[in-house]
Amino acid sequence: MLRALYDWTMNLAGHRHANWALGAVSFIESSVFPVPPDVMLIPMVLARRHKALLIATICTVASVLGGLAGYAIGFYLFESIGQPILNFYGYGEKFASFQSRYNEWGVWIVLIAGVTPFPYKVITIASGVTGLSLPVFLVASIVARGLRFAIVTALLWRFGEPIREFIERYLGILFTVFMILLIGGFAVVKLVL
């Protein structure tokens, strides 16, 4: 099944609407969707290496715009949904302490999480919830997401076919490692919050 999904994604990467699909996935991943845009980014760059810069740019712009949507979710929905839940469980004071620490280190949190496989949506929503400065959030997001997608794209562009062969040979192992990182990211967030 994993091989069929990989082959389908590779075929989609060459489709004439692939850029729009990548933009949509990148946007919603930054606010609500659990699957990172790398699922499309990697095969798209491998299939169309000559368009690597365009693909990385689409991914970055859509991801940052999606990050703003995540920020808005945290900022506008926290008072009506999140705060009453925290108060009910007696976590209001703990959250205030967390909020203070988050805003003190917010730029670094956004930068680090934006470059790593850590679930970026968690950071976008947390940034809105804590009221992290929007310009700080925006600049950190542009730098982090741009850097992340530029690095992935540059490596794929430079080492194209050998990387593709490596991915195809070790697809099962790579998928397992990816899932461990994804679940581990959510576990870390649960421990922190």
Image (cartoon, helix red, strand yellow):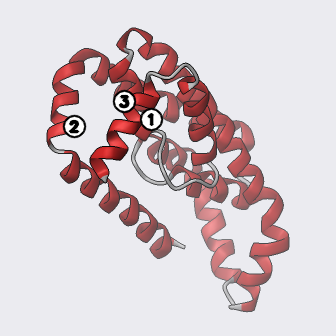
Callout 3 crowding tier (Cα within 10 Å): few <14, some 14–19, many ≥20 = many
Q: Are marks 3 and 1 in contact (CB under 8 Å)?
A: yes
Callout 1 crowding tier (Cα within 10 Å): few <14, some 14–19, many ≥20 = many
* Rendered residue at 32%/45% (across/down): 4
Q: Is residue 142 visible?
A: no
What's the residue type where badge 3 is placed? Pro
Callout 2 crowding tier (Cα within 10 Å): few <14, some 14–19, many ≥20 = some
What's the residue type where badge 2 is placed? Ile
Q: How many marks?
A: 3
Percent of width and height locating residue 5: 37, 45
Between discs 3 and 2, the one toward the N terminus: 3
Q: Are marks 3 and 2 in contact (CB under 8 Å)?
A: no
Label 3 element class: helix
Q: Based on the displayed image, in which of its 4 quarters is residue 49 positioned? A: top left
Label 2 element class: helix
Is the residue 39 above or below the residue 193 in the image?
A: above
Q: Which quarter of the rendering shows the C terminus?
A: bottom right
Which numbered marker is on residue 167? 2
Percent of width and height locating residue 13: 44, 27
Percent of width and height locating residue 56: 48, 23
| Separation of residues labelled 1 and 2 (CA atoms) | 13 Å
Report which residue position mark 3 lands on. Answer: 43
Q: Is residue 189 visible?
A: yes
Report which residue position mark 1 lands on. Answer: 40
Is the residue 148 above or below the residue 181 in the image?
A: above
Label 1 element class: helix
* Rendered residue at 78%/57% (across/down): 75
Q: Based on the displayed image, in which of its 4 quarters is residue 76 positioned? A: bottom right
Between discs 1 and 2, the one toward the N terminus: 1
| Separation of residues labelled 3 and 1 (CA atoms) | 6 Å
Percent of width and height locating residue 105: 55, 53
